[in-house]
Image: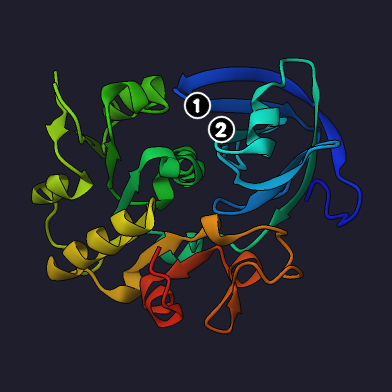
Amino acid sequence: MFNRDLYNPKMFVIEKVESLAPDMKLFRILISKSEYQPGQFAQLSVLGVGEVPISIASSPTQKGCLEFLVRKVGKVTSAIHALKKGDKIGIRGPYGNNFPLEEAQGKEIIFLSGGCGLAPLRSLIRYCLDKRDKYGDITILYGARTEKEIIFKKEIDSWKKLPGIKVYISLEKGPAPGDFTIGVVTALFDRLRNLENKKIFMCGSPLMVRFAAGGLLKLGATNENIFVSLERYMKCGVGKCGHCYVGGKYVCTDGPVFSYREARRLGVEG
């Protein structure tokens, strides 16, 4: 826990700003103590402009800092993108639930994401890698529109070199040099086998999640073993504004992580 005050965001110093892709920057924030779990989010704010919920992209095993991938899509995120190393940013959080870490122990894991949806999964991927003996083999499926829009490129390359980890990337638009596959992320499903007992974690656009989940179910995955992050529905982060209320649940407090069975019941599915 680094700041749960609903009315007063705590100011933290930005240690590093890195441009990862067009309109996507990774912000590293210095923080002395941080208690959170993979899958949770925080509210980032710029005084006089507003605040926005952003998933935590770093792992709790990474001490002394927090990392957030911010995509420039509106007024607040544009203001955040204008911040530089040494500037201060307001933070509230952490909020929401987390990915089921204990339930995944001893299991093979599949991570599936598209675009900036890799950011919240990166938190869990890093966590699993830092506690490698607790988890089985890992498969990462990632889809981007073009090669220039792939985020965490250097880190992905390092993952490929690790034992027990397979990484596959699809590009919607070619050319596709190297190991890339042309098509959406579901074009990578021919790499998957025996999904019945594997844990699957997804984050991406609603369309991607819906089609990907449908394909995974046909391959033998179960609704209970697929988990999806629905953070895009959130606004205030604490269940007060009602913006994320759907199907009797507040995504910001009951989620943002749901099993796909629950996501289907809520009628959101990603």
> Is 69 left or right of 31, judged from the image as shown?
left
Q: Which residue in the rendered view is the most extreme toward the top?
A: 85
Residue at point 44% right, 23% down?
22
Q: What's the residue type where badge 1 is placed? A: Asp
Measure the C-alpha gap from mark 1 to mark 2: 5 Å
User: Would residue 190 be visible to someone looking at this image?
Assistant: yes
Label 1, residues with CA under 10 Å away: few <14, some 14-19, many ≥20: some
Nearer to us in this view, 207 or 201: 207
Q: Is residue 177 above or below residue 233?
A: above
> Is 78 left or right of 187, judged from the image as shown?
right
Which label sits on residue 72?
2
Q: Which residue in the rendered view is the most extreme toward the front?
A: 75
Q: Is residue 78 above or below residue 113?
A: above
Q: Secondary structure at mark 1?
A: loop
Q: What's the residue type where badge 2 is placed? A: Lys
Label 2, residues with CA under 10 Å away: few <14, some 14-19, many ≥20: some
**Residue behind mark 1:** 23
Nearer to us in this view, 174 or 190: 174
Whether pointer 1 and pointer 2 mark residues with C-beta atoms closer than 8 Å, the reply is: yes
Q: Residue 246: x percent and y percent? A: 55, 77
Residue at point 34% right, 43% down?
114
Q: Residue 68: x percent and y percent? A: 60, 35
> Is 166 left or right of 133, judged from the image as shown?
left
User: Would residue 125 be visible to someone looking at this image?
Assistant: no
